[in-house]
Image (tube, grey):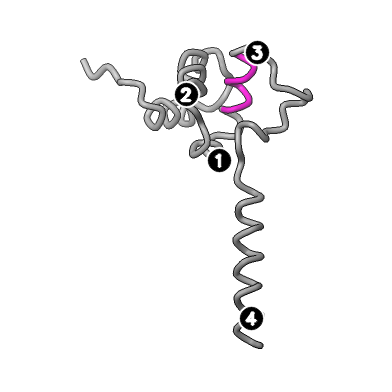
Amino acid sequence: MENQARGKEKENQYEKKEATRLNPKRIPWDYPKPLRDDLWRARRMAEFFPFVLEELTEEDRKILLRQLDEINVPDERKEFIRMVCGEKQNTD
């Protein structure tokens, strides 16, 4: 009986963790459907970064990198986004 209770507790913890993971498709976009405005979409993804990282599609990453200089987030976050989204840094 005690083992069942522990198993159920672990299951509940896993479900809570999964429910709190941010998915770009579930980000509160403030609209019923995400707008097609790339700058606006990139801004929302940057605001929730890195919590949305695992769920970003290749298209999301390209939009984010393309619009990054126009987004008002700390420089450290921009650097981190560039690093993990694969933008090549100019080391010359």
Q: In the rendered structure, which amino acid carries the disc numbered 1?
A: Phe
Q: CA distance from mark 4 to mark 1?
A: 32 Å
Which residue does the numbered mark 4 point to in the structure image? Answer: 4
Q: CA distance from mark 2 to mark 3?
A: 15 Å
Marks 4 and 1 in Cβ contact (< 8 Å): no
Marks 1 and 2 in Cβ contact (< 8 Å): no
Which residue does the numbered mark 3 point to in the structure image? Answer: 36
Q: Which residues are magenta?
A: 39-45
Q: In the rendered structure, which amino acid carries the disc numbered 2?
A: Arg
Report helix, strand or loop for mark 1.
loop
Apparent side of residue 87 relative to residue 9 in the rendered image (left or right): left
Query: Nearest the camera: 20 or 47?
Result: 20
Q: Is residue 75 above or below residue 6?
A: above
Q: In the rendered structure, which amino acid carries the disc numbered 4?
A: Gln
Q: In the rendered structure, which amino acid carries the disc numbered 3?
A: Arg
Q: CA distance from mark 2 to mark 4?
A: 42 Å
Residue in the image at 60% along x and 61% along y: 14
Which residue does the numbered mark 2 point to in the structure image? Answer: 61
> To which quarter of the image does residue 87 belong?
top left
Residue in the image at 37% along x and 29% along y: 83
